[in-house]
Image: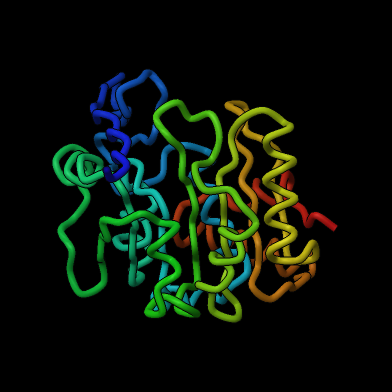
Amino acid sequence: MAARTPALPEVNFSDWGDIRYLHLGTEWVQGSMKLDAPFEIELEYVQRMMAWLLFVEPSSVMNRHAMQLGLGAATLTKFSRKQLRMRTTAVELNPQVVAACRGWFKLPADDAKLRVVLADAGTEIRKAEWQGTVDALQVDLYDHEAAAPVLDSEGFYADCRGLLTEDGCMTVNLFGRSSSYERSLEKIAAAFGTEAVWAFKPTREGNTVVLAQRTPTRPKRDALAERAQTIQTRWGLPAPKWLRVFKPMS
């Protein structure tokens, strides 16, 4: 007898003031959207998932490829496609999440530069078509309890590294107890190399964003500051603030 696939959680949303929140059958927030600015990034940790912009020439961004593993409320997907004008691919397991994003969170229909793939991320990213094609990989894979990442092995992070272009970056949201964070960080460092890993301090809510580069670089502080200012001016992200709480692992 075939093993039964675990039931996917039900998807719903709640509105609080001018913010809409996505839930997977619990009170845990899986994403959010400003109702009057649906293509901006509202949550601090989600803004930090864009830290890869610090490592690329701003004029090159629109010619690059972003991929999200885990759609959430489609915040990163919408920002990459609409604000950054990038080719954007999102991989999501739960068809209800895709339907919710299209119905409640202003996710546009697929087009020449946007593709939502309904699949298990751990399987999808091993396909040959994606290898070496992704400039900005954003990993935010949590179950409905938001206790620990669903995919969090050294092998998974090695597969993620295989997706990246030579100057590509992965950003990962790590949320949970400090012991869980330390274990995840060790696995990322094992897959990418310690010198390739950068990390933010945790947000007030306990989200820690980690960045790993396919090819390690150490930009000078003044170069990072100049690029951060450009990111803030061009795309409205608080990148100058990031530099106070963002540093290499080694």
Query: How many numbered badges does the structure rendering display?
Result: 0
Q: Nearer the viewer, residue 249 or 146?
A: 146
> What residue is shown at x 48% (from left), y 30% (from top)?
146
In the image, residue 14 lies at what x, y percent?
26, 22
> What residue is shown at x 70% (from left), y 66% (from top)?
192
In the image, residue 145 lies at what x, y percent?
45, 26
Residue 231 shown left or right of residue 5 in the figure? right
Residue 122 shown left or right of residue 14 in the figure? right
Q: Quadrant location of residue 160? A: bottom right
Q: Quadrant location of residue 32? A: top left
Q: Nearer the viewer, residue 34 or 200?
A: 200
Picture layout, residue 54 above or below residue 148: below
Question: Looking at the rendering, in which quadrant would you find the N terminus?
Answer: top left
> What residue is shown at x 70% (from left), y 53% (from top)?
187
In the image as oriented, which residue stretches furthest toward the right?
250
Residue 125 shown left or right of residue 161 in the figure? left
In the image, residue 179 lies at what x, y percent?
73, 32
